[in-house]
Image (cartoon, coloured by chain):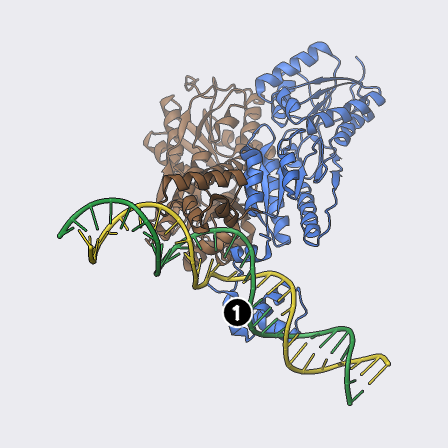
Chain colours: A brown, B blue, C green, D yellow
DNA sequence: TCGAAGTGTCGAAGCGCTTAAACAGATGAT
DNA sequence: ATCATCTGTTTAAGCGCTTCGACACTTCGA
């Protein structure tokens, strides 16, 4: 193993000089810097992470707490995890993966051991028991999602209310009058009312403004439950011509069911999905969809946590921050003008 | 921050005694142990990770290198990542997430800095350039997937050949004579011939044994490409009554296409998917599928890496290990007896 | 009764790094 | 010429933990 002392010897300087070259925390003459850097390269030196963490009291690691649940669309979580990892690397940080099931004790463990300098939490519940722990330990954290009480932390999320509103606008613009919103199963609403409810609220508000008659039905995302949901909608409102689908699992079944019931998309009914573009492109017809970038979510969370860590390190109190990312509606082949009244 | 010295003072012993209580590496009287442990609890002591890593030369972290690619079914990767994390926790280990794009330098960085005691690599290519680096650095590693040359490492994977064979057997048992295998896009075959080719080989071998006429067509997994693939199959072999689908993205489109072309599943044609049970259950009809457990994959990889780390720590040479997990065929509603000759 | 072996605990060195403080030498103002 | 200032480098003190060897005490066989 190559140590900083080896590099120092090789470059003919003291080890503190090597340290200062690497951290840039003191002025070093150009000539010395060059010499040290080439020694570093030549010897293949990598600072020992443990020693660095111990001496500097910073681990250069952020922890990412991911949910175990599978009712949220999993590829999105993976995309976030990966974008967090890559964004963190840009700052010289690595990412430690922690599962949600460790709960508040997990937070205590990570903070207590100094394993991570900060924490990014996904799938935060509105009244999450980890949040008070975070606050009492003074641990720096960024949430992906919104918490009830976000004092002492930074948050980032999609602007789901706007996403819902965009759906309502698009259908109204196309002349639809009766529309249905197919949401998540009731579990999701009860738990982290976050995105599910915010989308619905945004949709409802705009739908009312635009004079749309609308229906909201929750749906578990299986074929059977989608069939049941659709049957109820069509029984209650036979004139429904527009569908907004939030549950990714319900999309495929819905399209199949509409087809078998003799309804053509988009001539007879329009369908908008709230899902990733990649998924929207996979169906036939390709779906008009409203999406926010999952990558961006991860990137912003990393920026937030880095800003907090930097502030603390400079002796400042980190500023709380709250970012909502604006979603985008992409028109594809599943939405069209409302059919003429029959 | 609570240190080991605080605990020692509180319990009225020396800090080395506390250390031995916690590690169990020396005999400690029952009475002292109790006293120390209750001090630990009372003070909420967590050993400082950096100091521990520095002194013991073990970080208690394993790195998990995940692919950036999205052509592999993403939820499976997430499931593996999570099961790795949870299994590692059982051994007192945490998991560091590294993206594939760091390549061999990533391996050097992790090994050189002592950040991780071992490495679990997913999505290994047959002739992966990280493997020689691993070997030259003496880094302990476990692969999820099989490499060309696995000397010096442990591997675990599904037994895809058996999975393919199970598909052939099931269709043959049901009396089908002409079957088609819908594989991945050609990129997957060229890159990590691993699972794609092994499945196909297993299928082909058994199909020949059982006297099945079969066709293999690659497919990108989009609606359009599935449509093209199916059209070609039906043009080349109009009598095809059995389908094996490996590309998860092609499943939905295939079912839709079969339906629109007037073929009923399973009365006219049988469909077997090579995919997770969860996904297989989502379609209508629910699909007969062959699967191995992704969780088990992660668990075994962790066991392997732990065994290697323990061996190295004891001064032994770690034994190479290679595990293939046996897949299971679950019969559901998408396969049935071959239709009578018309 | 004595030495050997075993048991339980402690002291202290050291893991590889960061960083405050000291220091040497050059530069400039007086 | 003298002192203050600045620049670039070194010295040395830890960071909190593990672990080796030492030590005190008990137990046991001869």
Q: Quadrant of the N terminus of chain B?
A: bottom left
Q: Which residue is mark 1?
A: B7
Which of B296/B278 is in front? B296
How many other residues sit within 10 Å of disc 1, few (<14), some (14-19) or many (≥20)?
A: many
Query: Left or right: where does residue A234 sit relative to residue B250?
Result: left
Q: Describe the element under mark 1 as helix, strand or loop.
A: helix
Q: Residue at x 58, y 47 (%)?
A: A1
Query: Left or right: where does residue D13 sit relative to residue B180?
Result: left
Q: Quadrant of the C terminus of chain B?
A: top right
Q: Is residue B161 above or below residue A220?
A: above
Tell me where residue A240 appears, x and y as whole percent: 45, 26
Tell me where residue B276 appears, x and y as whole percent: 66, 35
Tell me where residue A263 appears, x and y as whole percent: 52, 20
Query: Left or right: where does residue A95 sit relative to residue A178?
Result: right
**What is the chain identity of the residue bearing mark 1?**
B
Which of B121/A145 is in front? B121
Question: Could you tell me if residue B30 is visible in this image?
Answer: yes
Which of B296/B53 is in front? B53
Q: Quadrant of residue B234?
A: top right
Q: Quadrant of residue A138?
A: bottom left
């Amino acid at each position: 193993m190559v140590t900083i002392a080896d590099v120092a010897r090789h470059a003919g300087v003291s080890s503190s000089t090597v340290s200062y070259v690497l951290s840039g925390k003191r002025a070093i003459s150009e000539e010395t810097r060059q010499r040290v850097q080439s020694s570093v390269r030549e010897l293949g030196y990598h600072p020992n992470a443990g020693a660095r963490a111990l001496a500097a009291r910073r681990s250069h690691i952020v922890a990412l707490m991911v949910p175990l649940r599978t009712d949220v669309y999993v590829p999105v979580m993976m995309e976030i995890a990966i974008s967090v990892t890559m964004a963190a690397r840009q700052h010289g940080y690595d990412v430690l993966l922690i599962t949600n099931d460790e709960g508040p004790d997990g937070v205590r463990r990570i903070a207590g051991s100094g394993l991570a300098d900060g924490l990014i939490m996904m799938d935060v519940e509105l009244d999450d028991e980890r949040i008070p722990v975070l606050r009492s330990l003074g641990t720096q954290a960024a949430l992906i999602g919104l918490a009830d009480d976000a004092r002492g932390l930074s948050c980032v999320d999609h602007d789901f209310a706007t996403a819902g509103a965009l759906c309502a606008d698009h259908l109204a613009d196309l002349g639809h009058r009766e529309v249905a919103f197919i949401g998540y199963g009731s579990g999701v609403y009860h738990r982290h009312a976050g995105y599910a409810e915010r989308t619905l609220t945004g949709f409802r508000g705009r739908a009312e403004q635009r004079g749309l008659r609308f229906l909201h039905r929750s749906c578990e995302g299986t074929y059977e439950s989608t069939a049941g949901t659709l049957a109820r909608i069509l029984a209650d409102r036979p004139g429904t011509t527009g569908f907004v689908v939030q549950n990714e699992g319900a999309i495929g079944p819905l399209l199949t069911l509409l087809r078998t019931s003799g309804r053509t998309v988009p001539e007879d009914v329009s369908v908008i999905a709230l899902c990733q573009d990649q998924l929207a492109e996979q169906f036939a017809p390709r779906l008009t969809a409203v999406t926010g970038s999952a990558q961006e979510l991860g990137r912003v969370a990393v920026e937030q946590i880095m800003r907090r860590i930097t502030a603390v390190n400079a002796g400042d109190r980190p500023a709380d921050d709250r970012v909502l990312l604006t979603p985008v509606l992409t028109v594809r082949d599943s939405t069209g003008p409302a059919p003429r009244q029959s």
